[in-house]
Image: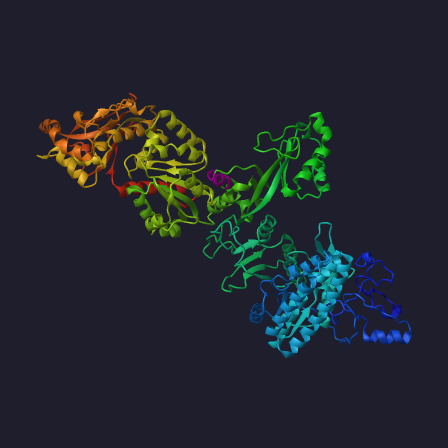
Amino acid sequence: MAYFSSAISNPRHHHLRLLSPNALPHDVNLNKLFSASQCRPLPLSPHRSPIFRLDFISRRARKEASKSKILASVTVSLHTWVDTPVEISPEVVKLPKGDVWSVHKFGGTCVGSSERIKNVANIILNDDSERKLVVVSAMSKVTDMMYDLINRAQSRDESYVSALDAVLDKHRATALDLLDEDGLSSFLSRLHHDIANLKAMLRAIYIAGHATESFTDFVVGHGELWSAQMLSYVIRKAGVDCQWMDTREVLVVNPTNTNQVDPDYIESERRLEKWYSRNPASTVIATGFIASTPQNIPTTLKRDGSDFSAAIMGALFEARQVTIWTDVDGVYSADPRKVSEAVILKTLSYQEAWEMSYFGANVLHPRTIIPVMKYNIPIIIRNIFNLSATGTKICRSPADQTEDGQSLESFVKGFATIDNLALVNVEGTGMAGVPGTASAIFGAVKDVGANVIMISQASSEHSVCFAVPEKEVKAVAEALQSRFRQALDAGRLSQDLFSFFIYVSPYLSSQVAIIPNCSILATVGQKMASTPGVSATLFNALAKANINVRAIAQGCSEYNITVVLKREDCIRALRAVHSRFYLSRTTIAMGIIGPGLIGSTLLDQLRDQAATLKEEFNIDLRVMGITGSSTMLLSDSSIDLSSWRELKQQKGEVADMEKFVHHVHGNHFIPNTVLVDCTADSTVAGYYHDWLRKGIHVVTPNKKANSGPLDQYLKLRALQRQSYTHYFYEATVGAGLPIISTLRGLLETGDKILRIEGIFSGTLSYIFNNFIGNRTFSEVVAEAKQEGFTEPDPRDDLSGTDVCRKVIILARESGLKLELSDIPVESLVPEPLKVRNKFNRSTLKAQACASAEEFMQKLPEFDHELTNKRQAAEEDGDVLRFVGVVDVVNEEGEVKLRRYKKDHPFAQLSGSDNIIAFTTTRYKEQPLIVRGPGAGAQVTAGGVFSDILRLASYLGAPS
């Protein structure tokens, strides 16, 4: 290893000074080799090598030193720049500033290959700005490769040699494909020289086993030097006046104690003017990421430093705009990996971009925005791979309206999240009114180097809650307990904080409460400050998605509202609020249970209407699962409803209700889930309570839940009222007719229900509408069965049980607490063909006939009974109708065959129509009548579909 020495003492040659490390005596210890404490500054010059040089003394310096006989033997010397005197024109070129300049920044992906560098050059050449400054990063992955070189050398891993060769090969191959003969020769000469010196430096690190931060910064900055040089050669080859700038000569920054840097704008501006006077050009290619300290020690702007470089340069040049080229179309309203419907925002204010960046949005680093704000320089984010996209403009006051005054974007611009956080709470009566408590708390946090992300304090001063990264929470908790030990022992702070939370810190004995596994969701928008109801809308959306909020913070500027949630709820919450503010479609994950006649018809209706719902109503209904009694079909995105029958046969698996529900509700993080029960199964109805409790909405035509045991019904309705989950069952009575909603509307507006009477069975309506003339009852029943109006076994319709269930549902909706057994039912099944169920006298089971076919064969034997009733009615000018009655006044109900005058509305029906008459205090003289088709797969499925759309409206779809 060659040591460093300095044998130049002639004060006339002050320009021959080392940057870092300083010249060392031959007996220096190697462990001090890379100390920056003795570094001496080196004045900068545009005529310099951009890398460390082994033969650092210029020929003129050698000559002068020789004349003075002071040149000592110089061994290998390490420095940054060498001041090589040149003839400087007496004419000073003044740096032009202002709108003549346009700044472009290209990241590593943009210059990742020779083809992409050519693409960058074309963009620059096609920019019609008078002057252009272009900031470039290192080629894709090169910065990581350079850091890897340092790490390998420090670990004494000799593979750093081959890794350095890979860096050389990457740039040499790019240059061979990119540059012409003259440019290639010049660039490769510098490249090989740089690599040779880097190899010597890495060898020094290998021996010492350590590299200082300054040395590391110098090494990793080479990637930018190489990419800037290659791009400048390409631009010059096109005949453009172009110079490349090593920004270490211009950009001066001061390190901070937070591992960041602060630009020194005054000194940087002075150096820029000096640099430009020597290198005037209409196009300047500048290195991003790298800079120097006031002592001329190489440094970097840390991660995302190239964006920061572009913003600083934009401010120094007072440019018209700064365009940051990347691989996305602009700034999204939310992370598109979490919200597939996230949209590109046309505009953002500086404050909005700042807030979104702080809370984890992949926009810009917050510090990037600071330099451009002073001069109101807009930043434009554009996609280099999609030049047709206009991108996102970040400026002070973005235009929010078109010429006709319509709003371009929501007052909430976007949402961002931070994961892996923990909440810490300090609580106690001894905190109230005590000056310095907050200072003591956060002083303790600062002492352990923890980063406080969010703070929330009760106005009573009784508690302070704040969020920190989960990896730092143990140290924070221990520091707080140590700091407040006396107060805890004296009882002025709670000894059992947050006992109501699910989890208490395992690190401590519950004296300081820790809630781990948290995430922050930030809602950002500058216009929120002038828009009432934003907070209400936000929390309403979270509540409807069954999301519990653990902490809240909002500044008086109202640029953001921050909430802390369970980590497992974060994506669901993000999608829920994003959807609610119209930035995406209202998306609902659906599970269809029972793909029988009604279920399959519903699926066909969903298929036919899906495109219209998305385009015109912003509703996205995604069927994630379909299950029958034996097989089920699941999808991770959405089932193709044009081929669900074939898919169910090909890819169906054994039905498992627990797995089905978990898949639809738990795996996709869609904010809203609805299960649609199209069965008549009481077992499925028994799941409703659990589903609603989990935040799953339920839509069904299944009557079993609402007509089952009264105590279960009351629990179901109580849960529905207490939670933000919805339970819709319009189709349980009247198929697609608005019976339930009409009844609720009357009650909610203060009307009092006196009596409900109606023909509730489409099957029995058809039968008695056609039981006229000389036709027999059995003949009409057979016709109804053939037309598909009856159940496979007509006794299920003739027993009156279905009508009885509808009567119970309406009675309970009216406030009556009746059981199914409280309703007397007149069955139309002849007595010899039935037997009463010992558990429920109104549930009739046909035991005398083994099958429906046998029942149909024997039914004609009993025609005379109903024929006699019909004839008696006709003699009095009446007709027979099978009706259900809810007598609210007397708190009773019944199901029976009754006679009505031929001018009565019930006598005017045709086909399978239903009719329901509501007698109320408002509609007492003339009942309110609802009439229409009350049976059939199309109308029943349509009623279910209508409930689904009503749910979407409740969840935020435009009305």
Q: In terms of depth relative to the viewer, which is nearer, 535 or 442?
A: 442
Is residue 555 visible in the rendered structure shown here? no
Q: Residue at x 50, y 55 (%)?
A: 344
Q: Quadrant of residue 706?
A: top left
Q: Residue at x 33, y 39 (%)?
A: 678
541 drawn magenta: yes
- In the rendered structure, the answer to whether residue 131 lies left or right of residue 883 reads right
Number of numbered discs overlaid on the protein picture: 0
Query: Where residue 57 appears, x then y in whole percent?
Result: 82, 71
Q: In which quarter of the image is residue 522?
A: top right
Query: Where residue 758 appears, x then y in whole percent?
Result: 24, 31
Q: Is the image coloured rainbow, by chain, by secondary structure, or in one colour? A: rainbow
793 drawn magenta: no
Most extreme residue toward the bottom, as rendered?
181
Locate the N terminus by quadrant. Answer: bottom right
Magenta range is 538-545
Most extreme residue toward the top, as rendered?
890
- In the rendered structure, the answer to whether residue 763 lies left or right of residue 286 reads left
